[in-house]
Amino acid sequence: MYFDFPTFVRQKVYAFTHGASDGPWLLTACQLLLYPLVHAGFALDERLHPEIAATPVRSPVFIVSSPRSGSTLLLELLASDPQTATHSTSELIFPSPTLRRILPPRVIAAADALFRRRFAPLELIHPMRFEQPEEDELLFLLLGNSGINSYLFPYGPELDHLLVNRFWEWPDWKRERFGQFYQRCLQRLLWARQVERYVGKSPHFLGKIDDLLRWFPDARFVYLVRSPEEWLPSALSMITTFWTLGTARPPSREALETIYRALRDLALRGDDMLARLANGAVATVRYTALVTDPCATVKELYEWLGWPMTRSYFERLTRGTAWHRSWRSRHRYSLEQFGLTRGRVREELAPLFERYGFDRQHSAVSSDAAQRVAV
């Protein structure tokens, strides 16, 4: 199992020389501890249960979007169907079923308590729980290199050459190592859950569309779109809150510019790749449609995917979406507080504004790649 030691070390050296507090070092200790445990756990999995290696991953569904575009909400709604497997946070941290089984319950409970305490400042932005669905990119932290790293510490342009957020520019051999690990994780989850349907999500998947299709040729994508004028300041607010957990220093203008460009490039790259896919491979969902009527959106997605919806799941979905409609976010943000203007955002992300006309209203779901604006 590959570990990207060169990137890992360079990021840690940068953090050490730029005022890292205890947060990044706690993450470092966890990575160095978990990697060999997971490596050993994977070997035990396949020795004790050789059928895991033969578990097929058929037609996985990947929720892709820029950050703060409703992917967490949609993942939670889909995860409430027992026939669908999604990774919980604990399964992302301990992807080996054997490891999860042999770890004492008090270890899991202590890890959960530590997790909640460390990420309490994010409660109003992105609550994190050990047993709730979470994004698959967390898995790659176990390999020492993940786009999430740029959310955890304000790395400046000095580390741009590491290409942490530009997965498509990595050498083929390195991308394949990450792909092999990801496939093994999905096999384990499907085997452990004893289901055939898999749904995963991550904003960082926008930089991995072609790789996901190479790893899973029959994959399908649910693409959530939201105006950059809305998701960009929300994402930057979330990321800069994360940064306060890693350092007491205020982020530099260079760090803010670096993360803005990474988000911009991911959004443009992902949208371009999804636009190239064949009809039927992508369902495009408007953020406004999802939050206005999540139940109807999920029902349309089930029809598109050809998944039967059981009565019990429909009732669970109805209860869950009724709660969501009564919820109101207290998260407040603006472009200006991060040194951005509407003019710059509209100019640099013009392809998205032109393609989706965010000021217009649309219906919920479109699976026709040629009619992707009519969502």
Image (cartoon, rainbow, N blue to C red):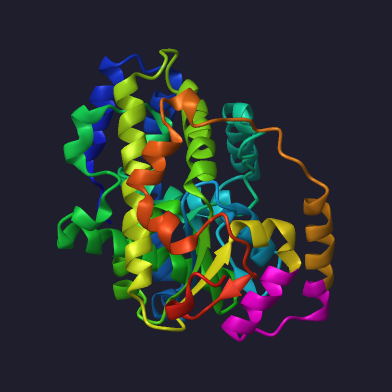
Q: Which is more toward the observer, 193 or 317?
A: 317
The C terminus lies in quadrant: bottom right
Q: Which is more toward the observer, 323 or 106?
A: 323
Rendered residue at 20%/40% (across/down) = 162
Rendered residue at 67%/33% (across/down) = 124
349 with respect to 49 (left or right): left
Percent of width and height locating residue 46: 40, 69
Rendered residue at 62%/41% (across/down) = 128
- Residue 194 appearing in the image: yes
Q: Which is more toward the observer, 230 or 320?
A: 230
The N terminus lies in quadrant: bottom left
Rendered residue at 48%/26% (across/down) = 336
Query: Magenta part of the protein: which range?
Result: 296-314
Percent of width and height locating residue 234: 54, 37
258 with respect to 153 (left or right): left
Badge count: 0
Main secondary structure found in the magenta portion: helix
Q: Where is 237 relative to 189, above or below?
A: above
332 with respect to 314 (left or right): left
Query: Is residue 310 located in the magenta-colored stretch of the structure?
Result: yes
Percent of width and height locating residue 307: 64, 83
Percent of width and height locating residue 37: 40, 48
Query: Is residue 24 located in the magenta-colored stretch of the structure?
Result: no
- Residue 76 appearing in the image: no
Q: Quadrant of residue 292?
A: bottom right
9 with respect to 233 (left or right): left
